[in-house]
């Protein structure tokens, strides 16, 4: 909109005065002729100073109002007669057709060209009107100043209103109700629709027409909110856009491709922002964005996300980061919580997690079924007995590896596609927790056991050759999964079991890594969780000093020439170590103490005297199942040669082999004989005999009859023909369960023990709370107990109720009121 120069009003030196004869008509005749020449671009010979004097004289003669009205009438006549004709002449029949809802492709070029001619005519008429009225306003400047005191709008404003009423709002023909503005509006909307369809339009031309609408007002006072652009064009533009994007959304859904929808929706947003900046008005940007958000994105987003074959499921499975990012941006525009997207991501994570769970269960079941198979005739692989259990362990570790791979996949998606959004992170974390803890409390839930086996395998051999940074990353990955495990007390039980084996059998690759693991667990789940684990390490350190002291004691007390059995001892605090697991004895059976060889028994008694002399009041209970021994064995070959080997065996295997020192060559011992002379538990005796007599590379004994099973009637001979390329031979124990996946019976035993421990934890929590609060209603007590214990496990509500009743029966608590149920602490 052209701006009018504001000049200082200066009184002319001479001219008509108030005291002279009123020559209004004469002056007006000269003035009107000159004003018309301004409109017709024929003002080269006009003296604007003379025109100004004439207008000044008319106002001084108190004929200002008449001059004002005559000028308005002249402008009206000019607009009605010349300008309107010029504009309507540019309106063709194709522009009138364009007002109907027809295909924009139909005769697009013809309509665009006709529209551009019409818009150019409007632009020219408007700019001419502005230019001429600027000049006329300068001539009538004194009139405007005087009439302003009578609240008359400036002549320029009045002329703009005349243009609005006598050009834009005039009908194109006397026999038609169609106005110039309606053709203007439909033409501009038609052009925008063409551009949305991929055509190129004259943006600057449309922008000048929009400038016109922004410079015209509904009222003579020209309030900002009454601009024609805001009152008539913008609502029409928004409504047309709403219909367009409703149709666009339906069309894109019909294509069935989510990536296409995201790309087009993103591109449409960019286009509309650009259109508001270059073609229409920046003030419309927020409103057109709302249209896009509601009609194109929000109304269709849920369907796009769930599109079969191309939706979020497909994007996640194929790591389509770019499309996921577009979808995330679109979701974030219309919903802060991004509910449809988070629901779809969570659903897919749980589905993929369930697939990992099912795969692990299937592998474990397949291995279990393999145990029951009878060997085929002629089968020559005795070690097959081990394979099913090993396969179960492999399946457990693979379960953890698969979940870590899935976690890494979604971490990558979260950072790159979801821009590290906290809402999405919470959704992903809750989904992992859901499937990891699926079936918690049932035999199908193995997450705690599998995770502990993962740590066990890596701390035994998985970290060998890795750098400190790699070890830290591996442990941190495991800790990440531990965060998701709800029943952390179950994990602690398994971890203690596996840690005890690593420590006692010296299987750990790095004690620094072991301590690093404890430190990480302490930071993650608290000091209470790691107290017992730290106590196990403390026992090992104390035992090293104790062994050193005992050896020093033996050297001082014995004959230096006498051959002695060297003893490395680990003294364990029974309340801190999983003694019931290490002993492998059912709790409902009485197991007599093992009978050690006399050489070992004397060393055993010697150490007991030494230890109890230092620690009065303590009791030592020997756990032979956790010990190892290095023994020297001599093999007399049938050809007369002698072969010696150092055998590293379990304590039970050492006890079995030493029995054969007193057995004449060629004689044997039955299974029953060995059991009677050693009292080794059946389970451990069978395993050790299999290791010594059946495992193909370690047959130090011969078994008759030869089979994969051990029966009470089997006979065992010392195998003098044993051969090995190694001087030192390690003989492992087959089918051990300590570092393998538990079978159903073992699982039930673990769950039974865990239930007892949880019951004690619940009671302790109840007593702590009541001791502090003295009285508490039932619902508040339940809430506080659940809150306190949630870090270790998810307590069963019925178990809490039973424990409350038990504490009442034992007079730790008492009922204070019945409604509502309230308990009191009994001091």
Image: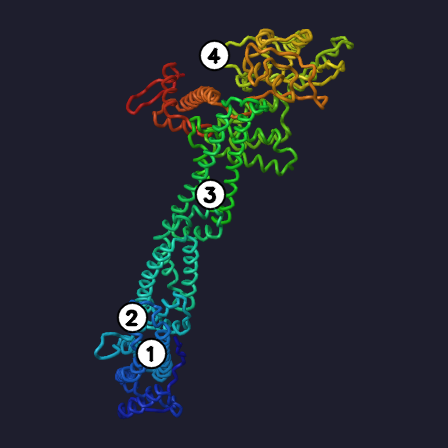
The first of marks 1 and 3 along the sequence is: 1
The first of marks 1 and 2 along the sequence is: 2
Q: Are marks 1 and 2 in contact (CB under 8 Å)?
A: no
Label 2 sits on residue = 99
Q: Secondary structure at mark 1?
A: helix
Residue 159 in the image: above or below residue 234? below
Q: Nearer the viewer, residue 141 or 725?
A: 725
The numbered mark at residue 156 is 1
Q: Secondary structure at mark 3?
A: helix
Q: Compute the Cα span from label 4 to label 2.
A: 93 Å
Q: Quadrant of residue 166?
A: bottom left
Q: Compute the Cα span from label 1 to label 2.
A: 33 Å
Residue at 43%, 64% (x, y): give it: 274
Q: Compute the Cα span from label 3 to label 4.
A: 48 Å
Label 3 sits on residue = 425
Residue 126 in the image: above or below residue 283? below
Q: Residue furthest front?
A: 377
The numbered mark at residue 588 is 4
Q: Are marks 4 and 2 in contact (CB under 8 Å)?
A: no
Q: Compute the Cα span from label 4 to label 1.
A: 108 Å
């Amino acid at each position: 909109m052209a701006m009018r120069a504001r000049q200082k009003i200066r009184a002319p030196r001479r001219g008509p005065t108030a005291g002279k004869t009123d020559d209004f008509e004469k002056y007006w005749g000269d003035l009107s002729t000159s004003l018309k020449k301004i409109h017709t671009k024929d003002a080269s010979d006009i003296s604007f100073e003379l025109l100004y004097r004439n207008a000044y004289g008319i106002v001084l003669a108190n004929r200002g109002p008449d001059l004002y009205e005559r000028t308005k009438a002249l402008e009206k006549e000019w607009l009605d007669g010349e300008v309107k004709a010029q504009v309507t002449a540019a309106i063709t029949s194709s522009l009138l057709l364009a007002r109907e809802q027809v295909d924009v492709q139909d005769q697009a070029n013809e309509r665009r060209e006709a529209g551009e001619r019409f818009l150019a005519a409007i632009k020219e008429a408007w700019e001419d009107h502005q230019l001429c009225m600027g000049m006329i306003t300068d001539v009538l400047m004194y009139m405007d100043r005087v009439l302003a005191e009578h609240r008359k709008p400036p002549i320029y404003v009045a002329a703009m209103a005349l243009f609005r009423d006598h050009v834009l709002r005039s009908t194109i023909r006397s026999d038609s109700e169609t106005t110039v503005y309606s053709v203007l509006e439909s033409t501009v909307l038609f052009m925008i629709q063409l551009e949305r369809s991929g055509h190129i339009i004259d943006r600057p031309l449309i922008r000048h027409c929009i400038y016109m609408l922004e410079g015209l007002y509904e009222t003579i006072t020209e309030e900002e909110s009454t601009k024609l652009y805001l009152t008539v064009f913008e609502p029409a533009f928004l409504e047309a856009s709403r219909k367009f994007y409703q149709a666009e959304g339906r069309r894109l859904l019909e294509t069935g491709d989510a990536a296409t929808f995201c790309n087009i929706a993103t591109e449409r947003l960019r286009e509309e922002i650009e259109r508001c900046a270059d073609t229409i008005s920046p003030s419309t940007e927020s409103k057109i964005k709302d249209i896009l958000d509601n009609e194109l994105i929000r109304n269709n987003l849920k369907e796009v996300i769930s599109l079969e074959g191309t939706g979020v499921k497909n994007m996640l499975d194929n790591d389509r980061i770019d499309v996921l990012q577009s979808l995330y941006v679109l979701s974030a525009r219309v919903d802060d919580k991004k509910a449809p997207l988070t629901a779809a991501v969570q659903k897919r994570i749980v589905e993929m997690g369930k697939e990992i769970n099912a795969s692990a269960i299937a592998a474990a079941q397949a291995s279990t079924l393999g145990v029951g198979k009878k060997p085929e005739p002629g089968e020559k692989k005795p070690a097959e007995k081990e394979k099913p259990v090993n396969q179960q362990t492999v399946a457990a570790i693979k379960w953890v590896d698969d979940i870590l791979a899935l976690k890494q996949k979604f971490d990558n998606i979260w950072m790159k596609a979801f821009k590290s959004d906290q809402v999405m992170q919470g959704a992903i974390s809750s989904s992992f927790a859901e499937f990891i803890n699926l079936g918690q409390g049932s035999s199908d839930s193995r997450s705690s056991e599998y995770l502990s086996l993962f740590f066990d395998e890596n701390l035994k051999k998985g970290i060998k050759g890795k750098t400190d940074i790699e070890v830290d990353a591996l442990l941190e990955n495991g800790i990440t999964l531990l965060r998701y495990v709800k029943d952390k007390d179950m994990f602690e039980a398994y971890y203690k079991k596996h840690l005890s084996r690593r420590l006692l059998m010296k299987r750990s690759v790095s004690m620094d890594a072991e301590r690093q693991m404890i430190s990480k667990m302490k930071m993650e789940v608290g000091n209470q969780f790691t107290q017992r684990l730290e106590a196990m390490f403390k026992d090992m350190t104390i035992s090293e000093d104790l062994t050193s002291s005992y050896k020093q004691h033996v050297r001082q007390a014995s004959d230096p020439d006498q051959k002695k059995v060297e003893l490395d001892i680990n003294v364990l605090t029974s309340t801190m170590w999983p003694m019931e697991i290490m002993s492998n004895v059912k709790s409902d059976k009485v197991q007599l103490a093992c009978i050690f060889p006399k050489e070992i028994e004397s060393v055993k008694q010697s150490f007991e005297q030494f230890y109890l002399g230092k620690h009065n009041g303590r009791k030592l209970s020997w756990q032979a199942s956790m010990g190892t021994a290095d023994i020297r064995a001599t093999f007399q070959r049938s050809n007369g040669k002698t072969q010696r080997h150092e055998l590293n065996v379990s304590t039970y295997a050492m006890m079995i082999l030493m029995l054969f020192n007193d057995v004449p060559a060629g004689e044997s011992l039955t299974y029953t004989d060995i059991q009677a002379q050693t009292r080794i538990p059946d389970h451990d005796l069978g395993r050790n005999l299999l290791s010594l007599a059946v495992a193909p590379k370690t047959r130090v004994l011969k078994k008759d009859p030869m089979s994969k099973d051990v029966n009470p009637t089997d006979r065992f001979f010392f195998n003098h023909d044993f051969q090995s390329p190694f001087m030192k031979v390690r003989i492992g124990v087959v089918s051990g369960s300590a570092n393998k996946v538990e079978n159903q019976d073992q699982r039930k035993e673990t769950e039974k023990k865990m239930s007892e421990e949880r019951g004690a934890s619940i009671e302790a929590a109840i007593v702590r709370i009541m001791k502090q609060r003295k009285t508490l209603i039932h619902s508040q007590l339940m809430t506080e107990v659940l809150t306190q214990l949630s870090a270790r496990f998810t307590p069963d509500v019925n178990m809490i109720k039973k424990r409350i009743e038990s504490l009442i029966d034992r007079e730790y608590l008492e009922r204070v009121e019945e409604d509502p149920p309230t308990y009191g602490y009994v001091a």
